[in-house]
């Protein structure tokens, strides 16, 4: 059994003041694999104080120094790639396919910010006045369990590029992954106090970060419900906030798309990261007169989807992260049946032979009405809703008929047409004909999917305050 009993403050691994123990459970078999000692308010205040002191010097660092730090962080994290792969599989059940791909791209978070820094102008002239873009201050970084390492690395890279110091509150459910990252960041050899880790509960550590007047900004990735609480608390001290929240992403298959390619891609996409992904396209919009053909293809794909142990290289869908999350997904499958949707594949219960873990069958509902709860609410599990539409205009209307607006996907043989449709979709990131990623392109959501943007120049500027000097 693994024990995590240190946090990272002011360049040192220290024993937490907090004493509460949180059990770490392997979701593949629900066996205990470790314990983490949780930090408390005192630990959080100590971390904030260290970051505040370090900011006095780091905020005055040069672009060249920040590029050097980013390079060191990148190299240190990449050295631990295999450790991160192994622990992600064990700790939250990320599939070998997904976590291997994810960790191969970790260095890109640092590379992209280096590229931005090489071109970015922190001082600008408007008429006879000078505008200086200066670091906002101490940043509280709060990250989720389903994308712990990438969230931490992308946010830290941006903060460092801006000249900000950070206090990171990773999910307590990601404590083993956090241990590896803490060690890697320590090995990078940055000046003390720039990066601090405080693993604890959201209502303890997160609340202190959000309310503490010495924290100037919160960057949060997680649920919409928690994001709203953070925004309400942060306003008392006028903190800047970046909130990357939930999603219910539409995937519009236009009638000229190649269904033999588009539908399998859509199903696999809906189940990315075992469908525990905020950007997963879990609403599949298809033309009504092609619904029968789509159903046949989607059913075959789902029935051939491998739900299994995450360490196996051929596994497509691993376990849900916890019993609580498994129960949540099962409840939504029941809701779908009660609402009158047609169950095309999967359904309630666990796949045969996987009864010990939190495994959910690859489930598809068809003939779904967009007003149904399974079409409106984020499930965070392998449940895909196929929604028919009659016209392109109706497809756009359905896609936008959601409280969320994080991502969207469009398939068409005519790229100009796809671009025209994309321009009418209310979502922060839209992919055409498949799935693509660019760490320099802004990421974030419309509506209840969040506030602000991350990545690249847009992400950097969220960590900067413009100061005008008129003369």
Image (cartoon, rainbow, N blue to C red):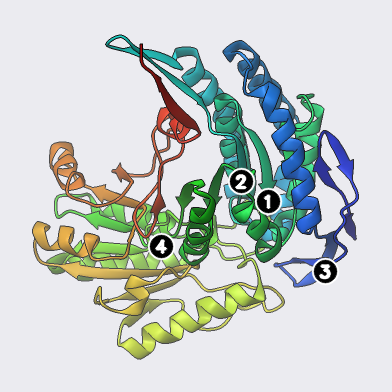
Q: Rounded to the nearest whole Å, what is the CA distance between mark 1 and mark 4?
A: 38 Å
> How far apart are labels 4 and 3 at the CA level?
34 Å
Query: Disc 3 to disc 2, how far (Cα)?
Result: 28 Å
Q: Is residue 124 above or below residue 431?
A: above
Instruction: Specify the quadrant that holds the C terminus.
Output: top left
Give residue 154's quadrant in the image: top right
Q: Earlier in the sequence, mark 4 or mark 2?
A: 2
- Location of mark 3 (residue): 32
Mark found first going from the N terminus, 3 or 2: 3
Task: Kindly report the distance in space between the C-alpha atoms of the residues bearing marks 2 and 1.
Answer: 6 Å
Disc 2 + disc 1, Cβ < 8 Å: yes
Q: Earlier in the sequence, mark 1 or mark 4?
A: 1
**Vertical placement of 11 versus 117: above or below?**
below
Q: Viewer-nearest of labels 1 and 4? A: 1
Q: Gap in Å between the C-alphas at discs 4 and 2? A: 38 Å
CB atoms of marks 1 and 3 within 8 Å: no
Residue hosting label 4: 301
| Residue marked by disc 2 | 141
- Give the answer, above or below, for where 274 lies relative to 84: below
SS of the residue under disc 2 = strand
Front of the two marks 3 and 2? 2
- Indicate whether 212 appears above or below 72: below
Quick check: can you spot residue 95? no
Mark 4 element type = helix
Closer to us: 297 or 67: 67
- How many other residues sit within 10 Å of disc 2, few (<14), some (14-19) or many (≥20)? many
Which residue lies under the disc numbered 1? Answer: 169
């Amino acid at each position: 059994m693994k024990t995590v009993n240190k946090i990272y403050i002011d360049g040192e691994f220290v024993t937490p003041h907090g004493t509460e123990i949180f059990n770490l459970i392997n979701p593949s078999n629900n066996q205990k694999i470790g314990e983490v000692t949780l930090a408390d308010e005192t630990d959080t205040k100590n971390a904030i104080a260290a970051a505040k002191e370090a900011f006095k010097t780091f905020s005055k660092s040069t672009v060249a120094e920040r590029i050097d730090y980013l390079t060191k962080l990148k190299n240190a994290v990449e050295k631990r790639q295999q450790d991160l792969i192994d622990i992600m599989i064990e700790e939250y059940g990320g599939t070998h396919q997904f976590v291997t791909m994810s960790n191969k791209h970790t260095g890109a978070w640092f590379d992209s910010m280096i590229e931005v820094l090489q071109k970015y102008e922190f001082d600008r002239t408007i008429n006879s006045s000078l505008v200086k873009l200066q670091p906002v201050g101490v940043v509280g970084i709060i990250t989720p369990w389903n994308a712990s390492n990438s969230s931490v690395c992308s946010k830290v890279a941006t903060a460092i590029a801006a000249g900000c110091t950070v206090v990171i509150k990773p999910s307590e459910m990601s404590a083993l992954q956090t241990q590896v990252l803490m060690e890697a960041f320590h090995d990078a050899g940055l000046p003390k106090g720039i990066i601090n880790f405080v693993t604890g509960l959201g209502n303890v550590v997160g609340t202190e970060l959000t309310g503490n007047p010495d924290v100037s900004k919160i960057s949060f990735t997680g649920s919409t419900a928690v994001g709203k609480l953070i925004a309400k608390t942060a306003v008392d001290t006028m903190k800047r906030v970046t909130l990357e929240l939930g999603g219910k992403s539409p995937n519009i298959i236009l009638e000229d798309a190649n269904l033999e390619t588009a539908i399998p891609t859509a199903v696999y996409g809906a189940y990315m990261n075992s469908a525990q992904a905020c950007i997963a396209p879990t609403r599949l919009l298809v033309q009504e007169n092609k619904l029968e053909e789509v159903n046949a293809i989607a059913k075959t794909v789902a029935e051939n989807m491998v739900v299994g142990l995450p360490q196996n290289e051929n596994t497509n869908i691993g376990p849900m992260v916890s019993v609580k999350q498994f129960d949540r997904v099962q409840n939504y499958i029941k809701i779908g049946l009660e609402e009158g949707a047609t169950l095309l594949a999967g359904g309630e219960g666990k796949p045969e032979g996987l009864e010990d873990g939190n495994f959910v069958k690859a489930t598809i509902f068809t003939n779904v009405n967009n007003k149904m709860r399974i079409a409106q609410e984020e499930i965070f599990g392998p449940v895909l809703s196929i929604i028919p539409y009659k016209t392109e205009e109706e497809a756009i209307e359905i896609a936008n008929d959601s409280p969320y607006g994080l991502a969207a996907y469009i398939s068409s043989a005519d790229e100009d047409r796809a671009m025209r449709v994309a321009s009418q979709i209310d979502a922060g990131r839209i992919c055409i004909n498949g799935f693509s990623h660019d760490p320099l392109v802004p990421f974030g959501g419309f509506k209840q999917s969040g506030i602000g943007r991350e990545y690249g120049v847009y992400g950097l500027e969220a960590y900067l305050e413009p100061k005008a000097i008129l003369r």
